[in-house]
Image (spheres, rainbow, N blue to C red):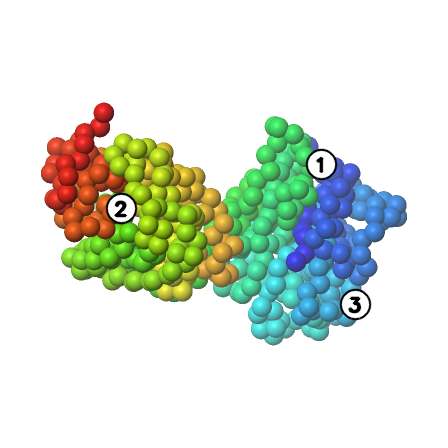
Amino acid sequence: MCSITGAVPLTRSASIDPDEYVSIFGRALERGRDAWGVASAVEAVRSPQPLTGTEAQTLMLTRLVRSAPSWVIGLNRAEPSTEHFAVDPDLDLAPHQMLDSRLIPAGHWTTVHNGIIANDRDLAEHYGIPRGGIDSRVVPYVFNEAEASNPFQIAQLLTNRITGSYALAAGHRDGGLVLACNYKPLFTCVRRDVLYFASLPHHLPDLGIRSTVRKMDPYSVMAINDGVVTSAPIQPRRMSSRHRYLVVLSGGLDSTTVLTGLVREGMDVAALHVHYGCYAESRERTAAREICKRLGVELIELTTDLFSHIGGSALLASEKGTISDGHRGAEYAHEWVPARNLILASIAVAMAESHGFDTIALGNNLEESGIYPDNEQEFIRSLNAVLPNAVQEGRRVQIIEPVGNLMKHEIVARGLRDGAPYDLTWSCYRGGDVQCGRCGSCFLRCNAFRRNGAVDPIPYETEVPLPV
C-alpha cells in the first residue's frame, strides 16, 4: 500500500531539516509510485504523476518544508485495484482536507493515510461528502469531530468510525500533529529535537548508534502539541463483554498450574489440547480431560498429523526414537520437536480469534528456557509483537506465560498453594502405564516436589534420581 512520512518539531527552537525530510520522502517512493503529495499547516503540493526527483520537484518540496512552521506530512500513493481515481486534485489527491459544498477547505485537519478504509462509502454518506472516489478522503471528516489533538477522543472515534486498515497522520491548522495506526506500521526517530516518521524503518535516516528508530505500538494514537507527546490505546472490537482466556493444556505440570491459577482467580477460562502424535499422547489426552472435568473447565480438543510428516524428533511416536534419561534429558533438548511451540501457538491464536478469546496462556517456564529456545520469554515477546499482523483488523489476541519467570520448584509451590490437581497430570515423555521416573521430564518434576518437601501424588516405575 502507500507510504506516509512527516516531521514535527518537539521544541520551539527546533526546525525541520528540508534536506532530511526530502531524503525520507524520496526513500519512501519504493512503497508508492502512482501519485504523491506533501502538506504543511500553510500550504500543500499534490501531483497525480509519479515523483521523479527532478530538480524542480526537489526545490518545490524543499521550499514547502522550509516554510513549515509546525509540521509537514506527505504520501507516496500506491493505487489499489479497487480505486483507479479520476484526477480531481481537490478530491482525489492527498493530503486530504475537509471540504464544504463549494469544495473549499472547511475543517481543521489535513491528513494522509496508508491502508484501505472498507466503509468509506458509508462514511461519505454520513458526512455528506461530495463526489470523489478515494477512501482516504473521509479521514479529515472523522478527525474534525475531535477536540483539537485529544488522543483519547481520536482513539474512540477511530474505533467507532473506521473499518479497515490504517496508519495515518493528521496535522491541525493550529499546529498539533496526530499519528495513529492499527496493524499498519509507523516508525519514528528524533533528530535535533525533531520527530520524523515513516511507514518503514529504512525510510528514516541512519542516525548512528545514539539514535533509536522506534515502532509505534499497534492500535495506538500519538499526539504532539507544543512538544508535549501524549498517547492512547485504540480499543479492540471484542466478541464478548468478558475477558476470556484460552490455556494451551498439555496435561502436564506447568500448564495445569497455569489453568488452576486462572480458575482460582475467577477468570473466564477454557483449555485447548492438541493431539499431535507424541509417545505419551493417549496419557496426555486422558490427563487433560480429567483435569478439565475436575476444574469445571471447557476442553477444546484438536488432532493433527502434521508433526508425523515433519518428523525429526524422538518424542514423536512415528519416529520411534530413544528418550534420554536423567540429567542428560534434563539439560539438553534431545527430544526437541521442530517448531512445535510455534505451530501450537499459531493454532491457539487461530482458535482464540475464531472463538472470541482475548488471551492465550502457556506453561512456558524459566527452568526449561535453558533447554528449549521456545520456552525463553523472548519467544513470547516476539510472538506478541507479530500478532497484530496475524489476526483480523480490529481483533486483539495476546499470549501470556504466567509461570514464565518461575523454576520448576516455584511452579510446584504455586500449584500446591492453589490446589492444582497434580494427581491427574502426566509429565513423562514415555507413554507407559505409569510415569517412567527416568526421562528428563520426570527428573525435573519429581525433584521439584522434593525441594518443596512435598510428595509427588503420581507413581513412578523407577525411583527418580536425586540431582548430583
Q: Quadrant of the N terminus?
A: bottom right
Closer-to-camera residue (152/256): 256
Q: Amino acid at mark 3?
A: Val
Closer-to-camera residue (466/229): 466
Q: Is residue 399 left or right of residue 167?
A: left
Closer-to-camera residue (35/136): 35
Q: Of discs 2 and 1, which sits in the foreground?
A: 2
Q: Residue at x 76, y 56 (%)?
A: 33
Closer-to-camera residue (403/453): 453
Query: How far across and how far down the image is residue 42, in percent?
Result: 75, 50
Q: Amino acid at mark 1?
A: Ser
Q: Which residue is mark 3?
A: 87
User: Mark number for residue 15?
Assistant: 1
User: Mark number for residue 429?
Assistant: 2
Per the image, label 3 sits on a secondary structure element best described as: loop
Mark before the other along the chain sequence, 2 or 1: 1
Q: Count residues near mark 2 (Cα–Cα under 10 Å), then give few for <14, some for 14-19, many for 20+.
A: many
Q: In this figure, what is the number of numbered marks? A: 3
